[in-house]
Image: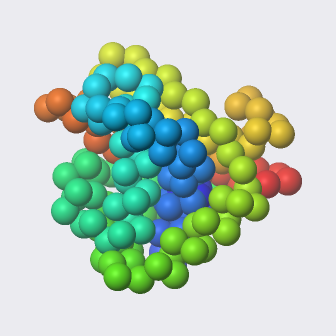
Amino acid sequence: MRKQHRFSVGMVGVAVLVLGAQWTTAVTVAHAAGVDEEARTEAAVMAVDQHWMDAELDGDRAWLDAMLLPEYRSVGADGTVHAKAAILAHAAKNRGNDAERRKVEAWLKAHPSDQSVVIRGDTAILTFYDPKLGPHNGVRSSDTFVYQDGHWHALYSQHSAVKGS
C-alpha cells in the first residue's frame, strides 16, 4: 500500500503503508523465523520493508529517520514527489492512532500483491505487483534500498497506477 498510498501528501502514509503492507504475510513469516534485517539477503530486504510499514503505522520516527536516506524520495503515480520529511511527518500523526492501520489493512485485503527482490552489489529493488497480472505487467510500486554501514536504507520509491488494481 505504501503503494498507491503515496499519491498525495494526505495519502503519503496510506500509499507507503499499503505498499509496505503488501508483503506483510511473507515478512511476518520472516520475522517469526528470526530474519536478520542486517543480512544482505532478499528476506532481509523484505523484513526491513515490513519494519518500515510498521514504523510508519506506529509513528516510530527514530527508526524511520535512521532507515530513510537523507535523499529519499517517493514518487506517486501522479508524479508528485514526497521527501523524507513528509514521510516522517505522516508517521508522527499515526503515533497512538490506529486509523491509518485500518485503512492499510482494508486496502491490502482489496488489493492482494506479490513481491520480488533483486539484489546487485549494495543495491536492492523490492517490487510489488498484482498477482493476476504478474511482475511484468502489474507493477504497483518499487522501493530501492542501498546497503550502507551494515544496514539496508531506502533511497527511492516509485508508484504506478495499475489498471484493474
Tell how many labels: 0
Q: State left or right for residue 149 relative to residue 119.
A: left
| Residue 88 image position (x, y, % from top left) | 30, 68
Residue closest to the eye, 129 or 26: 26
63 over 87 or under it: above or below: above
Q: Position of residue 14 (x, y in %)?
A: 54, 68
Task: Pick out the residue farthest to the front.
Answer: 32
Q: Judge whether 164 appears above or below 138 on screen.
A: below
Q: Nearer the viewer, residue 35 or 140?
A: 35
Residue 165: x percent and y percent? 79, 54
Can residue 5 be seen from the camera position used here? Answer: no
Residue that lies at the very extreme toward the left in this rendered image: 149
Residue at x-position 59% and y-position 50%: 22
Name the residue at 71% across, 60% down.
109
Q: Position of residue 80 (x, y in %)?
A: 53, 64
- Residue 96 makes an appearance in the image: yes
97 relative to 163, above or below? below
Q: Residue at x 40, y 41 (%)?
A: 31
Which of the 4 quarters of the picture holds residue 4?
bottom right
Residue at point 39%, 78% (across, down): 94
- Quadrant holding the N terminus: bottom right
